[in-house]
Image (cartoon, rainbow, N blue to C red):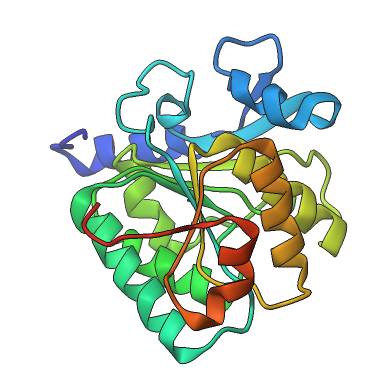
Amino acid sequence: MHHLSTNSTYHQHLQVTQTIQRISQTDKSYPSHIQTYLKNDSPETIWTRGNIEILPNAGNTTETADLWAIFCSSKCPGEIILNAHDLAHHFRNKGVSTVGGFHSPIEKECLRVLLRGSQPIIICPARSIENMRIKQEWKVPLSQDRFLILSTFHKASQQNATMAGKRNHFVAALASKILIAHAAEDSKTLEFAQTLLKWGKPVYTFDSSYNKPLLQLGAQRYQFGS
C-alpha cells in the first residue's frame, strides 16, 4: 500500500488508477486459467481500471493466489443474510482477496463491508466501464492500489441477463474458490453452481437447511475460521 504525502500526489495517483487499460489474450497480464475454463468463450480483451498488479498472473500474485468469488441469489432467508454478513467481516479481518459482480443486495452488502478493509478487491460489472462513473466509496481503495474494476464488455449497452451470465462465468473462472451464499431450488444460480462443479472448481456454501439443493449438488460446507 502506498502512503501519499501530499494532496497533489494523491489526486495525481487517483487519476492514474482510474485510467482504462486493455489486456488482450496475448498479454502476460491475461489470466491463463480464464481460457482453461471458458475455452472458446474466453474474452479476447479485458478492460480494466485500477491496479492490475492484483490480477492473478499480473506479477504480484501473492495476495490474490487465494481469490474468493462471492455469489448470492437476489432473495434469500434471513439466516443466510446473517451468514453472508459474518463472512464479509471474516474475509475483511483476515485480508482475504475477493472478486464478484457485487450486484445482488447481499453481494452489495458484502462489498460494503469489504471496502472498509485493506485487502484486494476485484469488481466485475456486467457492462462496459467506458464512461462509467466511479462511485465515491471506490475512490479510496482505488487510491490505495487495492481495487480493480474489470469488464469483458467493450461498448456501452443496456444490461441484460445474458451479460450478467457471461460476467458471472468470467468471475468464477478468475477465482480460485467460489462461495455461493444461497441458491434457491430450480434457480439460475443453482444451475450456475452445477456448471462450476463440473468445471472442478471448489464451491462452498453455508451449512444451512436452506442450502440443501447446493449441498446435494456437491458444494462443500464453508467453515468459519478456516
- Vertical position of residue 28 compared to residue 203: above or below: above
Of 43 and 33, which appears nearest the observer?
Answer: 33
Left or right: 119 in relation to 49? left
Q: Position of residue 99 (x, y in %)?
A: 49, 48
Q: Is residue 122 above or below residue 65?
A: below
Regarding residue 172, the answer to whether it shows in the image is: yes
Left or right: residue 44 versus residue 104 is right
Residue 76: x and y in percent read 57, 84
Q: Which residue is drawn at 63% across and 11% down?
A: 27
Residue that appears at 30% across and 25% down: 62
Residue at point 74% right, 26% down?
45
Q: Residue furthest bottom?
A: 78
Q: Is residue 130 left or right of residue 124?
A: right
- Which residue appears at 66% of the width and 27% of the height? 34
The quadrant in which the N terminus is found is top left
Query: How many numbered marks are there?
Result: 0
The picture places residue 148, in percent across and down from the top left corner, at 48, 41
Is residue 130 in sight in this rendering?
Answer: no
175 is higher (above) or lower (below) than 224? above
Q: Which residue lies furthest to the front in this view?
A: 216
Closest to the observer, 63 or 33: 33
Q: Position of residue 195 (x, y in %)?
A: 73, 48
Q: Is residue 93 found left or right of 214 in the rendered image?
A: left
Query: In terms of image quadrants, where is residue 174?
Result: top right
